Amino acid sequence: MKISRALISVSDKTGVASFARALERQGVDIISTGGTADLLRKENVPVREISSFTAFPEVLEGRVKTLHPRVHGGLLYKRGNPKHEAEARERGFEPIDLVVVNLYPFEATIAKPDVTLAEAIEKIDIGGPSLIRSAAKNYESVTVVVDPADYDLVLENLRDNNGETTLKLRERLAIKAFIKSSDYDRAIGNFLNKEQTTDASFSLSLPLTVRLRYGENPHQTAALYGDFDRHFEKLHGKELSFNNILDISAATNLIAEFEEPAVAILKHTNPCGVGSDVDLRAAWEKAFATDKRAPFGGIIICNRPIDEPLAKSIGEIFSEVIIAPDFEAEARALLQKKKNLRLIRLLSPAGEARPKIDIRSICGGVLVQDADRENQIARNVVTKREPRKPELDAMLFGWRVVKHVKSNAIVYAAADRTLGIGAGQMSRVDASRIAIWKAEEAGLSLRGSAVASDAFFPFPDGLIAAADAGATCAIQPGGSVRDEEVIAAANERNLAMIFTGRRHFRH
């Protein structure tokens, strides 16, 4: 059916004037609302106000303007159905063949810092989703456009089909419209559910970014959803795998802890070593010295652009992925000689790229929690001896790393580097022993080091092992029923110890 009448009402006005002008030149009667109508008139596009079409004024500060039987009747009546046609004539329903709508920017509004509930509610579109659903339901006769990117496609389709759109295009646009409406409602529901702390259900809809070759293992299918490519750009190398993406995310979460220049090495999402220095090559050497075996085939991330000296150093070992805010030309040319190496540019600050929620699949559903982005700690000194400044710096460095190590987690650290890391053990004393063994294997002394634990020491044995290895201070959440025993063991060995009041389990 030839398009004779269009209703255009958009918040995102990108390209709408030229689109409407092209429609008008094809003899399409254009109806519009509010700001869209004002814009079209300024652009000399003939337009009818919605109130003249409905014979009813916009009311309630524009909250009610398209919610009218003449609008939805003109969209929903079945063309070619004798009963519908007769009723449409009787009621004065003029056909609306094309709806062009995009919605109030609710998601952009709630993304603003300190947005109020009242401000968010005002950006909940009512008329727009109603128009979209009415038009999409009757896609056999009505074309619905919710994305400015589709304007040219619609115009081309009209030109190729003598002023009509094809059923195939209408079907495709209707599906897109329903998905858009669903995503919009989901964003509103999730926001209100969080703001009001209700027991409503959780839902999430993300666009497909790319289908992956396989998942964690070759027999598993996998895909990436969301806006990963808004934060990361692949500059070189093969396509990213499922495991690469997990590691990139873990590395970004870790490096976000550091404002000072830092280099981190990870393997299977666990830190192998972290170093900090204004000289990036020195930072790398500190990180690499922690464990020279595990980084083979690992992930390297730096929070400063990678220069040629650093590229030469890290290029000496095989890595799967190297991530940085940028790569100097000489460094990039050097690293791109390795065809199996993936170079990733971090497009957003690491802190912005980090997820806000953590979702885990479980038998029978999913677990959802706020992501662990907590950086504030109490620094409650519980021992007789206060930590000296170098000790405090070492404790805080270790604390920033240990929250990214699989539990049970122990990290031995100096003020600018890790010295030994023990990850994922069933007992905390075993994690400590592994960290000590790794330091010994690397030829690193733990004398004067700080020991960081992601959760409390349940018994004094883990702390005693740390003291025997040379640690002079400890940082841990506290909260064990045996805290007094652990504190006593620290005092007996003249250790300084801080309770943070924050646990950082990472299962």
Image: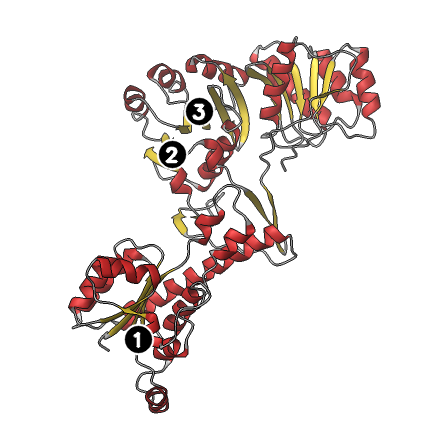
Q: Which mark is residue 303?
A: 3
Q: Nearer the viewer, residue 381 or 397?
A: 381
Q: Is residue 84 above or below residue 494?
A: below
Residue type marked 3: Asn
In the figure, residue 407 lies in which quadrant? top right
Mark 3 or 1: in front is 1
Q: Is residue 241 above or below residue 500?
A: below
- Lower position in the chain sequence, tag 3 or tag 1: 1
Q: Could you tell me residue 36's position as x and y percent?
A: 31, 60
Q: Nearer the viewer, residue 138 or 20?
A: 20
Q: Could you tell me residue 123's position as x and y percent?
A: 46, 56
In the picture, measured across the screen, residue 145 lies left or right of residue 447, that is left
Q: Nearer the viewer, residue 186 or 208?
A: 186
- Lower position in the chain sequence, tag 2 or tag 1: 1
Residue 223 visible: no
Q: Which residue is mark 1?
A: 96
Q: Which residue is mark 2?
A: 347
For label 2, count other residues whose C-alpha is less than 10 Å away and answer few (under 14), some (14-19) or many (20+).
some
Residue type marked 1: Ile
Q: Could you tell me residue 501's position as x and y percent?
A: 71, 29
Proximity of marks 2 and 1: CB atoms separated by less than 8 Å: no
Residue 260 visible: yes
Residue type marked 2: Leu
Proximity of marks 3 and 1: CB atoms separated by less than 8 Å: no
